[in-house]
Image (cartoon, rainbow, N blue to C red):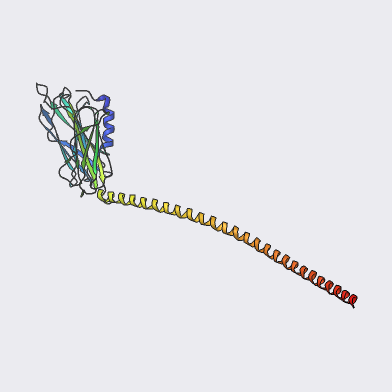
């Protein structure tokens, strides 16, 4: 059995982080079914959280020997009907189970309580149960939609056989998360996954996990949680929305390409209009030149007529002179 003092602070911190939330101002009680025990007689622990929680809630129970060594850590689910809980532990199995007065601390978020009992080991040194060593953490993906896959990772401070289950809101039994898969490259990390039913209720789901190894006296329990929100959509609806969004993105891209082609055509048309305007400007200049040419031609025609008239007059005069000479 490994002593716990070196990790006591870490364990207390884990309790504060992992204990599920209860309503502000809630109280918790704890008691055992007997004042003293011997050997491997089962110790039945019970209590009540008031007012009863409205979501899945658990109480973390830590048992310490007279020297304040942690000899057991347990998790007990709390009833949402009347707030009661119960837990059973088997004493003995390690040298830490010595004679004396033991303390059980019950913690559920900001509510705490404690009780004591006496214990006397048998001459053989106690029972054969495994004593707890170290701590474990639960990491659950959240929130989820009905029909999606539950993904949970459990990390612990020791190697062992890991198991994990979840409690749906109002459920009377846990649902297994299947076989654990060791995560390569990470010491003592285990992955779990299971399909969430398509009709899963909305609310907070409690995850319970444990890591045990009888050879090395490992027995660790811990909790976590995840949230299901069916008001958003189902996994199938979410997939359909994703497909429609993809189609819409494709359509928008096609429209953008078409607009680009139209823009190019408009630019080309503008260039053509500019060229036409330039040509029209050139035609206007040609019109002015034609007007000038017409004027020049008219002037030339007048000059020719004048010259012709003078020539005719000259010819007449010459004929008159010739006629006079002949007569």
Residue 38: x, y in percent?
10, 27
Q: Please state if 66 lies on the left or on the right of 276 as rendered.
A: left
Q: Work out whether residue 314 or residue 46 is closer to the camera in this orientation and state it.
A: 314
Q: Work out whether residue 292 or residue 227 is closer to the camera in this orientation and state it.
A: 292
Q: Quadrant of the N terminus?
A: top left
Q: Is residue 27 positioned above or below 241 on the image? A: above
Q: Quadrant of residue 216?
A: top left
Q: Work out whether residue 211 or residue 107 is closer to the camera in this orientation and state it.
A: 211
Query: Residue sitting at 80 percent across and 69 percent down?
Result: 307
Q: Is residue 31 positioned above or below 133 on the image? A: below
In this rendering, the count of numbered labels is: 0
Q: Is residue 57 visible?
A: no
Q: Quadrant of the C terminus?
A: bottom right
Query: Residue sitting at 24 percent across and 25 percent down?
Result: 4
Residue 129: x, y in percent?
13, 27
Q: Is residue 31 visible?
A: yes
Q: Quadrant of residue 104?
A: top left
Q: Is residue 299 positioned above or below 74 on the image? A: below
């Amino acid at each position: 059995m490994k002593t716990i003092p070196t990790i006591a602070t870490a364990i207390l911190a884990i309790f504060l982080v992992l204990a599920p939330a209860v309503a502000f101002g809630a109280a918790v009680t704890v008691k055992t079914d007997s004042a003293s025990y011997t050997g491997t007689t089962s110790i039945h622990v019970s209590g009540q959280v008031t007012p009863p929680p409205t979501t899945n809630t658990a109480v973390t129970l830590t048992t310490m020997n007279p020297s304040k060594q942690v000899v057991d850590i347990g998790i007990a689910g709390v009833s949402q009907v009347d707030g009661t809980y119960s837990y059973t532990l088997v004493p003995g199995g390690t040298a830490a189970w010595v004679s004396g007065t033991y303390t059980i601390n019950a913690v559920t978020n900001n509510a705490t309580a404690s009780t004591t009992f006496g214990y006397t080991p048998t001459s053989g040194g106690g029972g054969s149960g495994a004593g707890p060593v170290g701590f474990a953490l639960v990491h659950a993906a959240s929130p989820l939609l009905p029909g999606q896959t539950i993904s949970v990772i459990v990390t612990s401070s020791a190697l062992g056989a890991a198991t994990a289950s979840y409690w749906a809101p109002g459920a009377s039994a846990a649902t297994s998360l299947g076989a654990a898969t060791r995560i390569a490259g990470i010491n003592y990390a285990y992955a779990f996954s299971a399909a969430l039913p398509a009709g899963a209720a909305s609310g907070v789901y409690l995850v319970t996990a444990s890591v045990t190894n009888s050879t090395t006296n490992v027995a660790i329990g811990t909790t976590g949680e995840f949230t299901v929100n069916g008001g958003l959509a189902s996994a199938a609806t979410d997939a359909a929305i994703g497909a429609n969004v993809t189609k819409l993105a494709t359509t928008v891209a096609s429209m953008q390409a078409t607009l680009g082609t139209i823009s190019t055509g408009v630019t080309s048309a503008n260039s053509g209009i500019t060229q036409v305007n330039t040509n029209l400007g050139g035609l206007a200049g040609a019109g002015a030149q034609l007007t000038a040419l017409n004027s020049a031609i008219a002037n030339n025609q007048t000059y020719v007529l004048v010259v012709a008239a003078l020539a005719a007059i000259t010819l007449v005069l010459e004929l008159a002179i010739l006629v006079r000479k002949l007569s």
